Amino acid sequence: MNGSNELRLARRTTRLGTETAFEVLVKARALEAQGRDIVHLEIGEPDFDTPRNIIDSACDALHKGFTHYGPSAGLPQLRETIAEYVSETRGVRVTPDEVVVVPGGKPIIFFVILALAEEGDEVIYPNPGFPIYESMINYVGAKPVPIRLREEMEFRLDVDELAGLINDRTKLIIINSPQNPTGGMLTKKDIDGIARAIGGRNIMVLSDEIYSRLIFEGEHHSIMSIDGMKDRCILLDGFSKTYAMTGWRMGYGVMRADLAMHVARLMTNSSSCTASFTQMAGVEALRGPQESVEAMCAEFKKRRDVMVAGLNKIKGFSCLLPKGAFYVFPNISGTGWPSKKLADALLDEAGVAGLSGTAFGDFGEGYMRFSVANSIENIEKALERIRTWTEKNL
Ligand SMILES: Cc1ncc(COP(=O)(O)O)c(C=O)c1O
């Protein structure tokens, strides 16, 4: 090649992974454009509208002039509100200088891994798990060390196994509860065990708690609440899932102030700041009425029950009842089909968009993920289509 036009990417760019949900969505939409009817169970976002009080407060903020740049770490009003909310919900004293507001929960994953991990470091992360963890660990040149989440443990991690993966090179451990894609939840005993496994080592924990308000059974336990863990912990939470605000792009991290300063600097170098009127709506979301969160959660629970009961009646599928988040993660090994091939066939031939378990890492083989962020009517339609398909093909 004589190549003056050759694209010469930085090596790290070629190591970035992706989030398959967005790709399957594009494919499903293309099929719809050809006239096909597709039931969308691929994407992880509430199908509800953002509550009215939050929309009104954003409009009000726009009229009041919150249309300018703000501080990179977030508006003081919102940082203060988040500090109070996290202090209350996690039972630790958090101050506003420990809060960084960013456009979505995802940038906290991006910035924290970028700020902490580099070549020679090891980062432990859940597998199957949110694909951005592994992608970012690879991007920064650190070594991804998966901890397998097992169905026989209701998709919780095994603390002894975690202890065996920790060594002198371990820089960061990522945990996620309630979990995407499995809906598994860590117990208080698990959280205590993780803290014990870390012991006196200087290892940070990124605790992704974005689904902490979407819980159907049991209670949420945060590692931040454990004595001595606050300074080792980066808590990720946000507005996308709890308040049906995925398109607003707003989330936050809570971390020791000396790390928050560097994460804020990454904001200065990338987005400058999160949209100011959006942040004012965030204040209303946390301080205003919470009934809509409860109503949404109750509806997700009903849908989960319909989906799990329906899947368990289909040949080749068996599905645990997830305890939180809005996904179900059936074991499909009884179909005899590899996950990706089955997900493709269900989309192409049955008109049901779901994700292959392998979209969440190698240990997702043998599983699929369906989001229940769709109506009961559509969930029943999807179940009927999957059942008909399996009768024809298995
Ligand atoms: C586990 C987990 N963390 C973080 C995020 C990112 O959320 P956001 O849309 O607020 O960036 C998601 C979104 O799907 C998620 O599932």
Image (tube, rainbow, N blue to C red):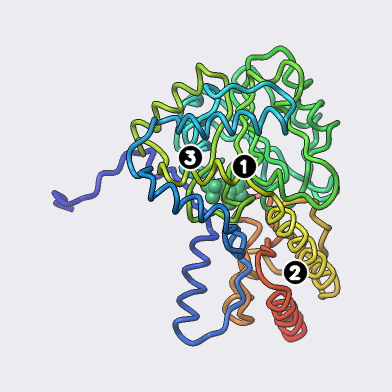
Q: Which is nearer the eye, 3 or 18?
A: 18
State whether residue 56 is above or below residue 340. above
State whether residue 54 is above or below residue 194. below
Q: Residue, x 76% and y 27% (percent of image)?
A: 194
Determine whether the residue tagged by mark 1 lies in a helix, strand or loop: helix
- The label nearer to you, 2 versus 3, is 3
Q: Which residue is mark 2?
A: 336
Mark 3 neighbour class, 10 Å CA radius: few under 14, some 14 to 19, many 20 or more: many
On screen, residue 320 versus residue 57, left or right, reads right
Q: Residue, x 66% and y 64% (percent of image)?
A: 373
- Label 1 to label 2: alpha-carbon separation: 46 Å
Mark 2 neighbour class, 10 Å CA radius: few under 14, some 14 to 19, many 20 or more: few
On screen, residue 152 versus residue 277, left or right, reads right
Q: Position of residue 266 (x, y in %)?
A: 40, 30
Q: Which residue is mark 1?
A: 286
Determine whether the residue tagged by mark 3 lies in a helix, strand or loop: helix
Asked where in the image residue 105 lies, by quadrant, the reply is top right
Does mark 3 have its CB less than 8 Å from ligand 1? Answer: yes
Q: Which is nearer the eye, 148 or 131?
A: 131
State whether residue 393 is above or below residue 265. below
Mark 1 touching mark 2, by CB under 8 A? Answer: no
Q: Which is nearer the eye, 303 or 165?
A: 303
Q: Position of residue 261 (x, y in %)?
A: 45, 21
Can residue 394 be seen in this snapshot? no
Q: Which residue is mark 3?
A: 107
